[in-house]
Image (tube, rainbow, N blue to C red):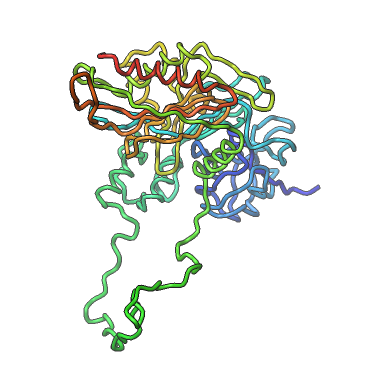
């Protein structure tokens, strides 16, 4: 009987078809013990560590850091060492020792969310400051960065690992590589000498731990004399004019781009899939109008006002606070309002849910958004926080733009977009005035809601935003 064992990449809790290798904790020829850290993998939500399912010698690894491995594909081959501790036969590990059962799709019919950013305080600035299911219960959607995916029943937590004499979580190591920070030169402020995300960002900002920042200097005496350069040929210089003095292309059309192709990974990879699926499935229609904020008294939290207005509009017109199953033609209206508020990051868009937004006051909304954003920043947000929205909010006006056609991701029916605030000249009885206004865009799935329902929803939202406080 062969003592070889193949470990296949399991479903990492999100139903994704692949994951990206962040860092190996072993190399070919190493001996690893049962449940020791084998590798850290990045999915669309987080960086997770995979423990070894056996004790033995590493024979083969699937790839190097940065490579994408398909779910169910070979990740590691072991030579099992019977003299070391092994897991009892038949004991459930949750690691998926064999290839996955056929029929598992990428997506899910469970709730998915859309991609946007949330508003912030006065002045038009826009910013965005779980429990595992019971054993044996059906697998529910664990949420996604953008859209909906299935999850496994296992939830893994990150722990700081030691590599190269440095203690850091996989997410921190990934961030260090991204920011080109040498972890061995970063001053650790975490417990037990662990390098934190804040440590890495601080080092990147001040340049104190840049990779290769201190190259060996060559003495002037040893430096070779510069080679003589040939005289420049003026005739060979590129010009935008022809010999007749007329404008011309410096390169013919169709010349291949000189940029470096980059394979989408993690968050962006999933976003591309979900956006394509949404485009194919939804029948989107957009209504736009301007909310007049001229009547506002004192400084007010734009985020809180937007969310309150959405909640009131959902009560007036429940048809847009709903999920729609296009295959079965089934609509589900929700008595509560959970708003998907996306957070824009360098890695892609995360869309946490602001739960029970219809019962929160302004302070509750602000504190909840700050908590969700902090969890997204350090990639510690639970999967349960990334699913189940009933409607979405996009505040693209943080950057630029007045109106938009934001994407509705099934099964949600609508998404509200808030544009950049402006001061507009408004006609009033007896003359003109300058009013502060917020452009609002409402995109909805026309299969699930009528144009009249959408227009009444938008009017209710605008009316609430126009109130003094």
Residue at 60% x, 30% y: name it.
151
Residue 188: quadrant of the picture = top left
Residue 268 sits above or below residue 452 on the image: below
Q: How many marks?
A: 0
The residue sitting at the front extreme is: 430
Residue at 31% x, 55% y: name it.
210
- Residue 105, given in percent of the width and then of the height, sits at 67, 36
Residue 113 appears left or right of 393: right
- Residue 12, given in percent of the width and then of the height, sits at 59, 36
Residue 6 appears left or right of 123: right
The residue sitting at the right extreme is: 1
Residue at 64% x, 42% y: name it.
71
- Residue 288, given in percent of the width and then of the height, sits at 40, 29
Residue 59 sits above or below residue 149 on the image: below
Residue 111: quadrant of the picture = top right
Quadrant in which the C terminus is drawn: top left
Residue 2 appears left or right of 236: right
Residue 87: quadrant of the picture = top right
Could you say which is closer to the camera, residue 448 or residue 335? 448
Residue 352 visible to an observer of this rendering: no
- Residue 177, given in percent of the width and then of the height, sits at 41, 51
Residue at 54% x, 25% y: name it.
412
Residue 309 visible to an observer of this rendering: yes
């Amino acid at each position: 009987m062969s003592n070889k064992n193949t470990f296949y990449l399991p479903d990492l809790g999100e139903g994704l078809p692949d994951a990206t290798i962040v860092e190996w904790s072993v190399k070919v020829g190493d001996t690893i013990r049962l449940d020791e850290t084998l590798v850290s993998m990045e999915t669309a939500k987080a960086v997770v560590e995979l423990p070894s399912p056996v004790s033995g010698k590493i024979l083969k690894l699937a790839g190097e850091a940065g490579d994408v491995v398909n779910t169910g594909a070979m990740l590691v081959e072991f030579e099992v060492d019977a003299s070391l501790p092994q897991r009892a036969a038949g004991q459930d590990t949750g690691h998926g020792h064999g290839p996955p059962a056929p029929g598992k799709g990428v997506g899910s019919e469970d709730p998915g969310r859309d991609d946007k950013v949330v508003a912030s305080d006065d002045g038009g600035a826009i910013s965005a400051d779980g429990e595992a299911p019971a054993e044996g219960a059906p697998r529910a959607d664990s949420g996604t960065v953008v859209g909906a995916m299935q999850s496994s029943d296992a939830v893994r937590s990150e722990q700081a690992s030691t590599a190269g004499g440095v203690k850091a979580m996989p997410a921190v190591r990934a961030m260090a590589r991204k920011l080109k920070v040498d972890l061995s030169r970063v001053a650790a402020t975490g417990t037990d000498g662990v390098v934190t995300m804040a440590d890495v960002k601080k080092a990147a900002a001040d340049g104190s731990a840049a990779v290769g920042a201190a190259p060996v200097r060559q003495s002037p005496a040893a430096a070779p004399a510069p080679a003589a350069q040939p005289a420049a040929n003026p005739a060979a210089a590129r010009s935008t004019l022809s010999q007749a003095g007329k404008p011309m292309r410096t390169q013919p059309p169709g010349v291949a781009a000189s940029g470096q192709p980059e394979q989408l990974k993690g968050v962006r990879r999933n976003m591309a899939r979900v956006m394509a699926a949404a485009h194919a499935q939804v029948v989107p229609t957009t209504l736009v109008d301007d909310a007049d904020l001229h009547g506002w008294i004192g400084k007010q939290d734009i985020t809180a006002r937007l969310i309150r207005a959405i909640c009131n509009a959902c009560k007036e017109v429940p048809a847009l606070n709903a999920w729609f199953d296009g295959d079965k033609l089934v609509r589900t209206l929700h008595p509560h309002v959970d708003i998907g508020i996306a957070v824009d990051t360098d890695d892609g868009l995360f869309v946490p849910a602001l739960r029970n937004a219809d019962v929160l006051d302004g302070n509750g909304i602000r504190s909840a958004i700050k908590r969700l954003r902090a969890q997204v920043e350090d990639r510690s947000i639970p999967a349960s926080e990334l699913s189940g929205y009933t409607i979405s909010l996009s505040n693209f006006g943080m950057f630029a733009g007045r109106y938009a056609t934001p994407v509705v991701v099934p099964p949600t029916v609508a998404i509200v977009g808030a544009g950049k605030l402006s001061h507009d000249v408004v006609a009033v009885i007896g003359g003109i005035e300058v009013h502060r206004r917020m452009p609002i865009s409402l995109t909805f799935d026309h299969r699930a809601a009528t144009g009249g329902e959408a227009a009444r929803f938008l009017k209710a939202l605008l009316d609430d935003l126009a109130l003094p406080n």
